[in-house]
Image: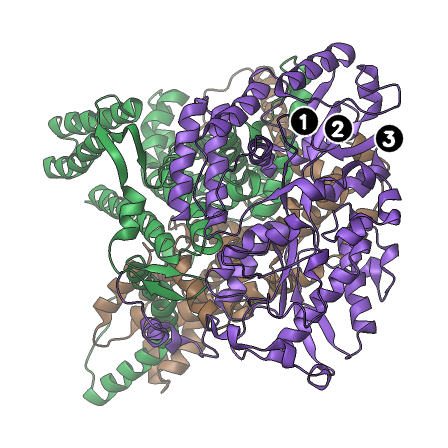
Amino acid sequence: MVSSTKSIPATQAPPAPPAGGRRTSASSRREARTAAVFLAPFLLLFVAFILYPVLQAVAMSLFDWDLLTQSATDFGLDNYVRMLGGTGLTWSLTSMLSWRLVLLAVVVTLALAARRGRLGARTAAVTAAPLLLLVLALGIHPGPGGQWNDPRFWAALRHTVEFTVVATPLLVVGGLAMALLVNRKGRSSAFYRTAFFLPYVLPVSVVTLIWIYLLNPDRGLVAWLTERLGLGAVDYLNEPTTALPAVILTTVWWTVGFTMILFLAGLQDIEPSLYEAASLDGAGRWDSFLHITVPGLKRVTVLVVVSQVIASFQIFGQVYLMTRGGPGDSSLVLIQHVYESGIRDSALGYASALSLVLLVVILVVSLAQLKLLRSEES
Amino acid sequence: MTRPLTRPALLRWSALSVAALTLSACGGAAAGSAETADLAAVTDDDLEGLTITVGDFFGDCVDAVGDETDPTVGTTECETMRILNNKFNAENPWGITVNREAGSEWSVYYDAVNSAFAADTAPDILFMHAANIPDYAGRGLLLPLDDSLEAAGIDTADLTEPALAGVTDGQGAVHGVPHDLHGNLVHLNMDLLAEAGLVTAEGEAVLPTSPEELVEHAEQFEQATGRQYIAWANDFNIPFRMFWTLVAQQGETVISDEGEATVDTEAGREALGVIADLYSRGIAQPEQTYDSSQQAWLNGEVGMLVNGTWVVNEYSRSASFDYRALDFPTLYDQPGVWANSHTWVVPAQEDADPARYRAALEYAAFMLENNEAWALNTGHLSPLTSVLESDFYQQADQRAGYATTAEFASLVPQVDGWQGAEDALARALETVWLTGASVEDALAAAQSQVASQLD
Amino acid sequence: MAVLTSPAPVTATAPQADPPRRRRRWSRIAFHVAVGTAVALWLLPMLWMAVLALSDNEALQRNSQTLVPLGLTFDNVVGELRTSLIPRWFFNSVVVTGITTAGTVLTSALAGYAFGRLHFRFKKPLFVLTLAGLMVPREAMFIPLYLMFATTDQLNSYQALSMPRIALPLGVFIMTQFFKAVPAEMEEAARLDGAGHWRTFFQIMLPLAKPAMAALAIFAFVQSWNDYLWPLVVGTNPQFYTLTVGLAQQQASFEAARSLGDLMARGVLGSLPLVVVFLLFQRHLVRGIALGSGEK
């Protein structure tokens, strides 16, 4: 069964002429009534289960809200103090140095791009300012004898960011490479596409089941291979340094087929005539790739990056099932912390405060996407 | 502290959500209302034909058990529990029926229990670890039982001292009926120990009597056999349980009976130092899990496995070598070992029906009376002195080797906030071998985090 | 064999001056060997699961590093089907996914038609509100929802599992775009026949929207079937686990590691439904994913 993914009417239907014409007030009233009925089911569910929970979370985060007794006490910012505060905090230039250097590099890149005119000065300033603040803020850390109020929050935040920063490029580059590899005519390429995509349809619990044992030092195939190669067997999920990377590897295997599909759709939007023209001009494969394929994929790349960043920040299932955040919190992520604080420790107020951090991060990323796409279009 | 929001106020907060749903019940149990219930006044007629629900985490295994009512045929925790349940339903004089609510796996059991309390749908009687009781009792969610035990014919004098202490809080209130006691034991591969010369002429295992001797034995063992001397499950909180054990053996505590954190002490430094030393010498392996340590031991690659009482019967069946289960060795002045207790608790219900409370307590009393089946089928220690000292118990497989654990077991005191504190403590301790933190720093961090959790 | 739908052939690697035929053939063979090997490695984890599922549990205790079934047996698979709750979980997943998918498609189509074709007051602010909903991380905001269902005693119910997942701003957005693009003449022709908004919607618009709705349905289906966190939170009773959650619960059990064959058999049973659906409907599935991500 071979056909084109291009048959989505939404993209094919010609733009509608402006609707309108004369209408009586009676018919427009009737139209408004119809609209209300048509919108009601969606809006009702939307307000009740998507918008309202956000407001409720904000409200809950201001209380010590106990799950077991359903009581809310101590109105105030205590949850935020517990989350963000600490005792004996100091600031130093060297704390989290590598992270801050990377952020600084981004700021410098932005500045250079602005100078060369590739980026609006305002956009650059608006993006760079919060980044610079972040660079400053990352210097804060507990001094000798001091402590964060909730070290687990910072561990979880850090691992969530690490997961996002490592997994996203892997998924983007891997998905693109696969898409280029299988973007050919013929049954064999179609088969390769199916194969690369197949893991994506497995439930997360099956994916983790397979990889928990695949990576098991006594039972798994990975250990079998590394032992044959004389490298010995590593218990990846129970070593602090390898636990998170193992989860990332599993995630890439599971979902890279998804990004491959998106890139395939993007490749297909590129005019074939462009390649023909280029090859007539004597351009090589690499030149074509660099000057036609890469620019042509810009839009889809932005979409892939943003959707992966948003998904990565909400990672939970793989971590919870493979490592439970361990060993020693070395792979703990934010949603697990929300889950455990709220349901295991019955601190719903604190859990709400934690989840609002995610809301803010994802809001910022989404807005950045909107901005990027808009500047792209203009 | 600001004025607590009352239930009506809470519901106003949730008004919008209620608009989208039908409000069928208000959540949460009425705290404290249970204390007025007089269970002794409940008559036989009141109990006649009651149906109540029970929650536990031992699974269904209905296929294996069916309608069996003879507890001696059970071979696992799940089978024994279901058979005892059948037996109660078949034999209790009031015709009470106890139905099991489909329960969760133990790993998510307390999440489900929390949800049930939040939704006000807690069963009539609930299985619970003694160490978890304060989290619920402190919120008024559990029925205090001290005045009612007698009415159900429970003889507290027959309970071992640790078992009773494990369910009694600082004010002397009892919130649970002990079902067993389970602590750390050492599970030995006698063949390997013999190979290493660690078995006496009489065939008794030679266990270390000091931390130094432990290291010597390990080295002697490794030289003789080329195998690992001692192993345990790092993902199963065993390091924390070892720490607790070694502190207790020095006659000290990790937390006082009044709920004060006493982690960063001389005894604590000694205990954590010993554990860290075992890791740094490569005697213990920090990445071993429940599964991998057990598998290695069963495969004859480990001399001594530190694990609980619940595996004794299973190991006895499946070990392909000479197996022996013994008390955890005493490395300091006095015997002592971390232990916990499975107990039955009665959730406070909104209607506070004394008859249902009493029925629940009768179920717990029945379980205690039939306790030897549980202890014999699984490996758990009985909480009853009469069972522990009985001939048939002493003569049962392996039991003589570790029945004494029931006397010197050290249970967590019933103090508010313990679960969070234990979690924080375990995490702080393991930074020593996971991230190379110093013993001093780890204990300082543990002390302050435990203290803040117990606040 | 069913294979993944092919996008229009693209020539990123194409027209070159013809190299000698033999060299081209060799490079083609080398390409297929390389990609074929990659594919084999890619599918190896799934194959291994199937192999272990068909192996004898006792044999797996001794050795599980194998690519052929040890003591080939169907006992694990049959046993899991017979004694476990898998059939029940499968049923739950079907119900929840069914309600969610149908609900999402229906509410999105209705709202999309209103936003795309009808005129009424507050249209713009309502649409902006819907777009704002796109930015709410649904995974992360589960605490208030959980409280909502807990306090109304609706944990462990189908409505708790499905209702919060029906409203999908993205679906409304997609359907709005679609209906906006339908030529006005089609509607006017119906109007001349005396059809009202309802008849126009059901007789003209919905049939037109079938492909878009199919893609949306597939997207909602995959999301719902593989959802883990929300069903984990609201389904605390095994009778109300979905397949994804139920399979996950047993991995933590003490016994699990000692019966690897059973464990893997569960994995196979748990993944088969969606793998079959995928192989049957992959054309729609791929389109649904491209659509759902906003690429199309």
Q: Could you tell me which residue is drawn at 38 percent across and 53 percent down? A: A351
* Tags 3 and 1 both on a single chain: yes
Give the amino acid type for the residue marked by disc 2 in the picture. Answer: Trp
Secondary structure category for the residue under label 3: loop
Q: Where residue B17 is drawn, which disc sits there?
A: none
* Tags 2 and 3 both on a single chain: yes
| Tag 3 residue | B320
Query: Badge 3: how crowded within 10 Å, few (<14), some, or many (20+)?
Result: few
Q: Is residue B373 left or right of residue C175?
A: right
Query: Badge 2: how crowded within 10 Å, few (<14), some, or many (20+)?
Result: many
| Tag 2 residue | B297
In this rendering, the answer to whether A337 lies above or below B345 is above
From the rendered image, report the letter of the chain displayed in green: A
Q: Which of B389 and B33 is in front in this view?
A: B389
Horizontal and vertical percent for residue A108?
Answer: 18, 25
Secondary structure category for the residue under label 2: helix
Q: Chain B is drawn in which colour?
A: purple
- Separation of residues labelled 2 and 3 (CA atoms): 10 Å
